[in-house]
Amino acid sequence: MLNNKAAILTGGSGFLGRYFIHGLSKNYNTIFILDTAELSDEIKGEFSNIDLKFYCVDISIENEVQNFFESIDQNINVTTLINAAAKNPSLSSEGMVGSSNFEDFDLKNFNSSVGETLLGTALMCREFVKFTNDKNNEEKLILNIGSDLSVIAPDNRIYGTDKNGNKIYKPIEYSVTKHGIIGLTKYLAVYLAEKNYRVNSLSPTGVFNNQDKEFVKKFSKTVPLGRMIEPEELISHVEYLTSSDSKFLTGQNILVDGGRSIW
């Protein structure tokens, strides 16, 4: 464990947050968690052996992001940022929030998704770089969380219909923002290389979370390995990508998708 180094994780209160924390805890014993939802007591108890510092921050609001970085104790050696905060509507029996055909997409939902996912990630990267820029002799790491839908289009055939019989579509804004994450990753990897930063993205396929059995069955047929990814399988990837073991890796999008993107 790198006891003298700390990491920042956005979206840490979400479903995948605990697994990202698990990955980070292999290398860091101080982790700043940023989210708009409070960190659960269950997660706090699960990670009682490390120092979790929770901050309620909307990363799409510039002054909230800036205020967070200004509040960090200068004696804490922050070297790593994971951007996991994202707006990802889930499928339910009611349908999917924001779902519509392209011709009718909702501008408010579109702007909200771009703000919460893409703009927020860019703001976090900007302020992280400003905060750590003077650590010239230390390697700094940025890991952006993408998706298999960062490189392929959603297969809308798997979502079925809502309770009113309307076809369900993955919202266009999800694809746009997740593709944008990869563009941001590549841009920053080149821009920051001379300043001793490495920037990569981790893009999992659909994560199993006790979804409807029919949906899981349909989704699994789109994956060569025949299943969704289990959240625990992301831990080792986070550990590797936020450690010196990946010291010659930058500008890459690591797809953990069971082969879905090659089919």
Image: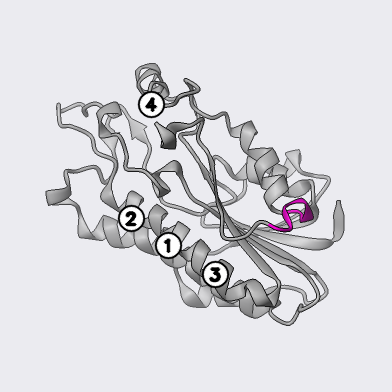
Name the residue furthest left: 103
What amino acid does circle 3 point to?
Leu
- Going from N to C along the chain, the mark reached first, 3 or 2, is 2
Residue at point 43%, 35% (across, down): 262
Q: Is residue 59 visible?
A: no
Q: Is residue 181 visible?
A: yes
Determine the secondary structure under disc 3. helix
Q: Quadrant of the C terminus?
A: top left
Q: Is 75 left, or right, of 118 in this rendering?
A: right
Q: Nearer the viewer, mark 1 or mark 3?
A: 3
Q: Nearer the viewer, mark 1 or mark 4?
A: 4
Q: Position of residue 181 (x, y in %)?
A: 45, 58
CA gap between label 2 and label 4 equals: 21 Å
- Going from N to C along the chain, the mark reached first, 1 or 3, is 1
What residue does disc 3 label?
Answer: 188
Disc 1 and disc 3 in contact, CB within 8 angstroms: no
**Magenta part of the chain:** 243-248
Image: 50 above or below 90: below
What residue does disc 1 label?
Answer: 118
Determine the secondary structure under disc 2. helix
- Going from N to C along the chain, the mark reached first, 2 or 4, is 2
- Going from N to C along the chain, the mark reached first, 3 or 4, is 3
Q: Position of residue 257 (x, y in %)?
A: 50, 35
Disc 2 and disc 1 in contact, CB within 8 angstroms: yes
- Going from N to C along the chain, the mark reached first, 2 or 1, is 1
Q: Position of residue 70 (x, y in %)?
A: 65, 79
Disc 3 and disc 4 in contact, CB within 8 angstroms: no
Crowding near pointer 3: few (<14 within 10 Å), some, many (20+)?
Answer: many
What residue does disc 2 label?
Answer: 176
Q: Nearer the viewer, mark 2 or mark 1?
A: 2
